[in-house]
Image: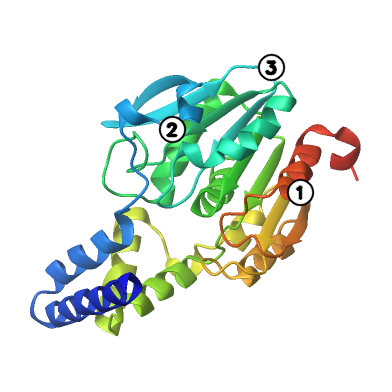
Amino acid sequence: MQRLFTYILAKLIGLYINILSYTSPQKALRLAYKYFSNPREGRLLKDSLPSVLKEAQAGIVTHNDFIFQTYTWKGNDTKVLLVHGWESNAARWKLFITYLKKAGCTIIALDAPAHGLSSGTEFNIPQYAEFIDIIVQRERPQYMVGHSLGGATALYYQSHYPNTILQKLVIMGAPCDFNSILHNYIGLLSLNSNVFLLLKKHFFDHFKIKTEEFSGSLFAAKIKIKGLIAHDRNDKTVAFKEGKKIASAWPKAEFVETKGLGHSMHDDKLYTKIYSFLFDSDSADK
């Protein structure tokens, strides 16, 4: 019943935006962009944080009037940065953190814009990458692990902020083409071509993004460091072929296919594989 209600609501919202696209295009754009970029889940309350985040050293970073939250589990000089995805937060790494602690490394996670305890109402990849760059330049992690849109942001980051700090990059369940994300959204709300063109113009005017050129495979082709890409055959959120496209463009990346994990990709076997890739030099140099 809840799924049916959500489906009907999405179509009604889309119908309203379609009508506005003829009578008030800018209002239609504002609404369409709001529903596209404003997460509805993933927020946290400071007074009721998940236990795994309570164990960390919390930090606050300000950047261009934004505040974003960081969490650090202190260890040795080897550092891993964890980058979560859409409608999530740093707590999504709870299971993986138990594996990383075995290495004795320092673990750093952050809440994306408009997620967790970070400020803002809007999520976009360029801004998320700015946040990541501040952490990378300050903490100098050797490794980064990103899930879903966090993985896509990690690809964008390493392509647009090339550096010699990061040595290995792990991407899990990440979408490749921005156009695919946009078309999925258009289909979900049954938005018309007017709205589609308005959104494309907005992305170019505000972020200099040409949607057809904003692609994980193009970003991956520029990355020189070693990578591990994991994607599940049964991922209903991000198609399996998206991961394959990224892998085919990344010269130094290994592709890992999983089955039955869905989009979350929480799995002992996979986490063991990632652990080996990050910390076992023999495995990493093959």
Q: Quadrant of residue 193?
A: bottom left
Identify the residue at image location x=27%, y=62%: 35
User: In the rendered view, would you say 105 is above or below 8?
Assistant: above
Mark 3 or 2, nearer chain start:
2
The CA span between labels 3 and 2 is 26 Å
Disc number for residue 50 = 2
How crowded pointer 3 is (Cα within 10 Å; few <14, some 14-19, many 20+) is rated as: few
Query: Label 2 sits on what residue type?
Result: Pro
Q: Toward which corner of the image does residue 4 lie, by quadrant?
A: bottom left
Query: Circle 2 — which element?
Result: loop
Precedes in sequence: disc 3 or disc 1: 3
Q: Which mark is residue 77?
A: 3
Q: Could you say whether the residue bearing mark 3 is in a helix, strand or loop?
A: loop
Q: Is residue 260 above or below residue 73?
A: below
Task: Name the spot of residue 262 as percent of width and height, x first.
Answer: 60, 62
Q: Residue 269 has which mark?
A: 1
Residue type for callout 3: Asp
